Image (spheres, rainbow, N blue to C red):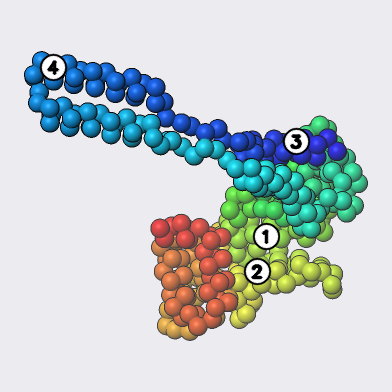
Amino acid sequence: MLIWIIFAVMTGAAVLSVLWPLGRRQPPIFADTAGAKSLYRSQVAEIDRDLGRRLIGSAEAEAAKAEAARRLLRAAAVETAPAGDSEPSLRRRRAASAIALSCVPLLALLVYGAYGSPSVPDQPLAARLKASPAGQDFAIALARIESHLAANPTDGKGWSVLAPVYLRQGRFEDAAKAFASAIRHDGATAERHAGQGEALILAAGGVVTSGARESLAEAVKLDPANARARFFLAIGQEQDGNIPGAVASLKALLAEAPADAPWTGAVKARLESLQGPSDPAAAAAIANLPAQDQAAAVRGMVDSLAARLGEGGGTLAEWSRLIRSQSVLGEKPAALKSLATARERLAADADALAALGTLAGELGLQEAAR
């Protein structure tokens, strides 16, 4: 209520300061004729003296007196301002002032009542942060959790709640730190280590770093069936150039997946981009070779695929597999050339072009092209 009293006083003072002059009678302003008359008499006396000394003629004396008289008339015969307000004019101005002083605040209150929310109680942030999270909007709930953790940094369960939120928001570094805090203060779990590994990978632009590998390995150690950690470890094998190992890991992951697992689509797409729909036998054969022979076999397979696609045609999966393999092998110029050719061949397929753009960003080929 106090705030409304303050607003009312301020509004009244502002309106009154503007309208107060309109309610006052304007005093008449007349010319000061006393000085003009004295000057006229002095001029006439001087003209008479000059006439007596015969310094001027009678005609000149009469003309000088006439000019002095005209000056006196201009100064004294008319008022320089109106004689003041008439009573009806003054009453009209005072009435207008009173109407404005009362109507302006009243109109403001009516507009606020129609379009504002006067019945809604105050909602200070501190009180909202202390309220139950149920029914709060997402931003308030997030601020509530962050405020709580700022005051209680050792609350591991709170960090475990906040970490996935940061991950979904794209705040990958914050997510990795939050997962680390949850592990440090509330113990290690497979999901926390897997989440930390994923956050580190996304923060590094899709590269499976050594820190991410350690987190993922810990997750698999705690839960050998953890699909999240196994998937990203397979991507790490792929980035190391161990395509057969990545294929084998992804196949094993699919073989053990529950029938209704929502992540199987992503695993199948990754597997198809690695081996292509027509190369499963070749991949299996390479996987059975000795370690020292696998690199040469992989390079031969990549060169063979590049030669075949260079002759024409090619599906999105085949081009993706070629570009990824060349990038992993360190052949950036060849990967860029294959990317450009794939875009030309698949120009009519908007989805394929979008997938190629995503792949280029993941492999850092766009930056290399600049």
Which disc number belongs to residue 9? 3
Residue at 13%, 20% (x, y): give it.
Answer: 51
Image quadrant containing the N terminus: top right
Does label 2 or label 4 sit earlier along the sequence?
4
Does label 3 or label 1 sit earlier along the sequence?
3
Residue at 39%, 22% (x, y): give it.
Answer: 34
SS category of the residue bearing label 1:
helix
Q: Which residue is mark 4?
A: 52
The local crowd at label 2, few if under 14, some if 14 to 19, many if 20 or more residues have their Cα within 10 Å, is many
What's the residue type where badge 1 is placed? Answer: Ala
What's the residue type where badge 3 is placed? Answer: Val
Q: Are marks 3 and 1 in contact (CB under 8 Å)?
A: no
SS category of the residue bearing label 3:
helix
Q: Which residue is mark 1?
A: 234
Residue 237 spot, x, y in % from top left = 63, 58
Q: Are marks 4 and 1 in contact (CB under 8 Å)?
A: no
Q: Which residue is mark 2?
A: 270
Residue 17 spot, x, y in % from top left = 64, 35
Q: Are marks 1 and 2 in contact (CB under 8 Å)?
A: yes
Residue 268, quarter of picture: bottom right
Residue at 73%, 72% (x, y): give it.
Answer: 265
Gap between marks 4 and 1, in whole Å?
A: 131 Å
Gap between marks 3 and 1, in whole Å?
A: 72 Å
SS category of the residue bearing label 4:
helix
Location of residue 184 with respect to 361 vertically, above or below: above
The local crowd at label 1, few if under 14, some if 14 to 19, many if 20 or more residues have their Cα within 10 Å, is many
